[in-house]
Amino acid sequence: MSKPEIFHFPRRKFLASASCLLLGEALFPLSAVARPENRLGQEVPEKLSSEDLEWVEKSTMAKDLKNYFGKGYSCAESLFMVSLRFLGKPEELVWAAAGFGGGLYHKDLCGFLTAGIMAIGVSAGTLKKERKEAKEYCSRLVKQYWKWWASRAPLRCAEIRTEGASRPVCVNLGRLAAAKVEELLSAG
């Protein structure tokens, strides 16, 4: 019978490591995703309110989303595709969103959130404005979209589609996101 190994960690090394961890947290605070203020979103309902339903029914992008989401296209790909179609851009560009579905394939930032931001960026790139002015436009719209999103839903896929949550949660969130992106791009 062999004797179990005992892990030995000298006190001096422990104190040095602990101080490095504290310094690291001071220099590099929690990531934006983990900050409590970015988890203020409400739980996404399985059914839309009559007001939300009326809003998404008026949206070309929200209606078009049903042609892509769940039909071979991820959340990010489907919202980005309807954005490209809305902006009159080549549909092959949808591949730019391929790695963003399912919360970056890690149940992290929701694909509908990231695709909306990508669509705003594409829209900014089509403006007949100086780069600085186009970037200001992009920044303004992204901030509006982020604020709207955080008031409606969690940022992370894992918090949106929790275990036991049904697919309609994502369908509804996608329809809402498409309507909001269309609204921002139209008003921009």
Image: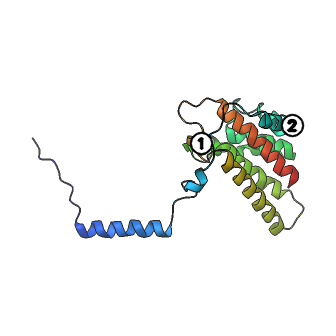
Classify mark 1: residues with Cα within 10 Å, few (<14), some (14-19) or many (20+).
Answer: many
Q: Residue at x 77, y 31 (%)?
A: 66
Residue 101, compared with residue 126, is above or below; it is: above
Give, as a three-letter code, the residue at label 1: Cys
The residue positioned farthest toward the left in the image shown: 1
Which residue is labeled 2 in the image? 58
Residue placed most toward the observer, 168 or 50:
50
- State the image coordinates of residue 42 (x, y, percent, origin top left): 63, 43
- State the image coordinates of residue 94 (x, y, percent, origin top left): 74, 43
Q: Any mark on residue 119, and which?
A: none
- State the image coordinates of residue 98 (x, y, percent, origin top left): 67, 43
Quarter holding the N terminus is: top left
Q: Secondary structure at mark 2?
A: loop
Which residue is labeled 1 in the image? 157
Residue placed most toward the observer, 101 or 20:
20
Question: Is there any visible trace of residue 64 in the rendered image?
Answer: no
Quarter holding the C terminus is: bottom right
- Give the label, 1 or 2, closer to the camera: 2
Classify mark 2: residues with Cα within 10 Å, few (<14), some (14-19) or many (20+).
Answer: few
Q: Residue at x 75, y 40 (%)?
A: 176
Q: Is residue 182 left or right of residue 98?
A: right
Mark 1 or mark 2, earlier in chain: 2
Q: Quadrant of residue 167?
A: top right
Q: Residue at x 72, y 33 (%)?
A: 69
Q: Residue at x 68, y 49 (%)?
A: 151
Residue 131, compared with residue 119, is above or below; it is: below
Task: Estimate the spatial distance between the alpha carbons at disc 1 and disc 2, rounded to whole Å.
Answer: 26 Å
